[in-house]
Amino acid sequence: MSVLSDTTIRRLIAQNKLILNGDPARALHCSYEFKAGRIVYGGITPPSQQVTAIDLCSTPAQTAIIQPSGVAWVRSHEQVQIPANMVGMWIQTNSLSRSGLLLLNSTLVEPGYEGYLSAHFVNLGTSPVSLSATTTIAKLVFAELDAAAAVLLDSKPFKNYDALIDGLAAQSNRSFLRIGELVPDLSKAADSSVVAARSQIKSITEKSLEQTKSDLENLTKKTFRKVAGGFVVGFILAVVFALWIFPALRGVDDESKRRISLIVSESNAELTGRLKMLEADLRETKSSLKERALEKAKPADAK
């Protein structure tokens, strides 16, 4: 198996083979780059209940936009004729993948097929992607078989290609996995959930405040009862002290006074005795001094 080069593709285009109404300049390297011809959006549009389609090759030139999560079929401008000894490989382009467009129908184009090709896109990016008649929607790589295929693809079902694509688009959703359609419902559900949550939080908060208030009141009452009880006990103890302990202390105080008086009396008696002894010694000393003075006052001859 070999892959056709851009030289071989251009030569076959010039011979009106392989790619009908093709542009040789779009045969690059080892593939052919197909242009956008017509776009059909997924889903139907009320009130017409018809699909929305844009012919990108009309005059004046048209453009089309695929919104984020949007689904669309883009039919090629060119048609192909796949010989019995070849197969085409329909592949994604880097430029569109970087923009967020994903090719959902990467596939083989079997030997014997004649007609248009289409790229089934979904925009998985966050920004809209614009398409025009010059946009490359996909590439086709041509591989040559080792022998002609024994069974060729019947192309008759694909003759009315646009009607076939319109039917597929009508049965599809506007957005991938109905994301675009579900977002408003999800927003409403989220808003409803938020309101319900806020109401529940408010109710729980009010109940908690009431419970806390009740607990504080009960704690205050219990504390008051304990303080009052302690005051009563203290008052009773004070009365007991006054009635029993104070007289005992008073008795102790009277005993102390008696003992002190006894000690003072004994001390006074001892001091009085000593004072009397000192007075007697003093009298005796005075008498002795007086006698000595008289003795000295006598004349010498009186001796």
Image: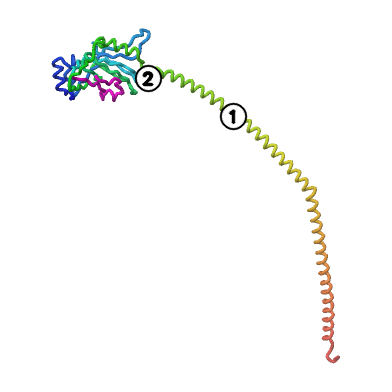
Q: Magenta segment range?
A: 85-108
Name which of mark 1 and mark 2 comes first in the sequence: 2
Disc 1/disc 2 C-alpha distance (Å): 46 Å
Q: Residue at x 82, y 60 (%)?
A: 258
- Residue 226 visible? The answer is yes
Q: Residue furthest front?
A: 150
Crowding at mark 1 (Cα within 10 Å: few <14, some 14-19, many 20+): few
User: In the image, what residue type sits under mark 1?
Assistant: Leu
Q: Position of residue 26 (x, y in %)?
A: 19, 20
Q: Is residue 263 above or below residue 121?
A: below
User: In the image, what residue type sits under mark 2?
Assistant: Leu
Q: Give the tally of numbered discs.
A: 2
Task: Name the secondary structure under disc 2.
Answer: helix
| Residue 130 is a magenta residue | no
Q: Position of residue 41 (x, y in %)?
A: 32, 14
Q: Residue furthest right?
A: 302
**Mark seen at residue 209:** 1
Q: Is residue 204 left or right of residue 56?
A: right
79 or 52, which lies in front?
A: 79
Q: Residue at x 62, y 30 (%)?
A: 213
Q: Is residue 55 above or below residue 270?
A: above
Q: Residue at x 30, y 20 (%)?
A: 104
**Mark seen at residue 177:** 2
